[in-house]
Image (cartoon, rainbow, N blue to C red):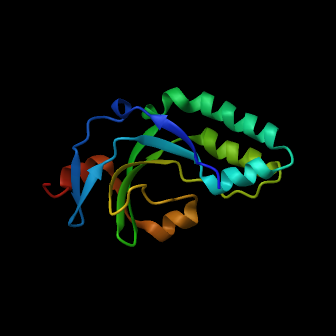
C-alpha cells in the first residue's frame, strides 16, 4: 500500500492550543505534526493503478498546490471527538470544497470514491497515528461528539 497523500499544516496557522487536553476523563496530547489527509494509502494505490494514473496524479497535485497555503484559515472551529477502541482523538473540521470537487472529478474518471470528511487531528490518546476517517460512514462509526473547538477547550477538564 502507498503512503497517504498529506498536506502539512503549520501549527501556528491553527492557533495556540494547550499541550494536553482532558476529554471524557482521558488525557489527550497535542499532535506536533498536523496535516490534512487528501487521500489515504489505499485510495492512493487505487489511483496509481488506474489506466490514466498520470492524469489523475496531476489533478491531485494541482489541488494540493491550490490549497496548501490557505488551510489554516479554513478550519471551521467544529470539533470532532472520535473513538476507536482505546484510541480517542479530537479533530477540527476543515472547509475545503476543492477537495470535494477533486473527489467528484476522480470519480467521474472511473474511481469510485466516497466524498471525504476534511479534518485535521489536533489531540490524541491511545494511538500514535490517529483514527482513520475516510468518509462519512467512517465518521459516523467513530464520532462520539461534535461541538465547537472553543467550547471544548473552555469546558475541558483541567489537565
Q: Residue at x 77, y 41 (%)?
A: 56
Image coordinates of residue 90 in percent, x first then y, are 35, 55
Looking at the image, residue 143 lies above or below residue 120: below
Q: Is residue 118 left or right of residue 66?
A: left
Q: Nearer the viewer, residue 37 or 33?
A: 33
Q: Residue at x 35, y 70 (%)?
A: 86
Q: Is residue 4 left or right of residue 123?
A: right
Image coordinates of residue 126 in percent, x first then y, are 33, 63
The number of discs equals 0
Q: Residue at x 70, y 53 (%)?
A: 45
Image coordinates of residue 108 in percent, x first then y, are 81, 49
Looking at the image, residue 117 lies above or below residue 18: below
Q: Is residue 115 visible?
A: no
Image coordinates of residue 84 in percent, x first then y, are 42, 69
Q: Residue at x 37, y 60 (%)?
A: 127
Task: Quarter of the image for the C terminus: give it.
Answer: bottom left
Looking at the image, residue 105 lies above or below residue 66: below
Amino acid at each position: 500500500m502507498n503512503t497517504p497523500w498529506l498536506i502539512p499544516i503549520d501549527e501556528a496557522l491553527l492557533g495556540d492550543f494547550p499541550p494536553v487536553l482532558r476529554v471524557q476523563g482521558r488525557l489527550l496530547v497535542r499532535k506536533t505534526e498536523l496535516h490534512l489527509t487528501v487521500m489515504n494509502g489505499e485510495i492512493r494505490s487505487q489511483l496509481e493503478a488506474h489506466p490514466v494514473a498520470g492524469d489523475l496524479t496531476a489533478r491531485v497535485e494541482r489541488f494540493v498546490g491550490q490549497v496548501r497555503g490557505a488551510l489554516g484559515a479554513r478550519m471551521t472551529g467544529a470539533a470532532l471527538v472520535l473513538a476507536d477502541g482505546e484510541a480517542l482523538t479530537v479533530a477540527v473540521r476543515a472547509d475545503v470544497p476543492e477537495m470535494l470537487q477533486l473527489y467528484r472529478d476522480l470519480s467521474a474518471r472511473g474511481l469510485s470514491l466516497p466524498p471525504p470528511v476534511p479534518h485535521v487531528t489536533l489531540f490524541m490518546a491511545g494511538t500514535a497515528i490517529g483514527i482513520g476517517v475516510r468518509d462519512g460512514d467512517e465518521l459516523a462509526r467513530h464520532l462520539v461528539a461534535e461541538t465547537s473547538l472553543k467550547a471544548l477547550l473552555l469546558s475541558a477538564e483541567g489537565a
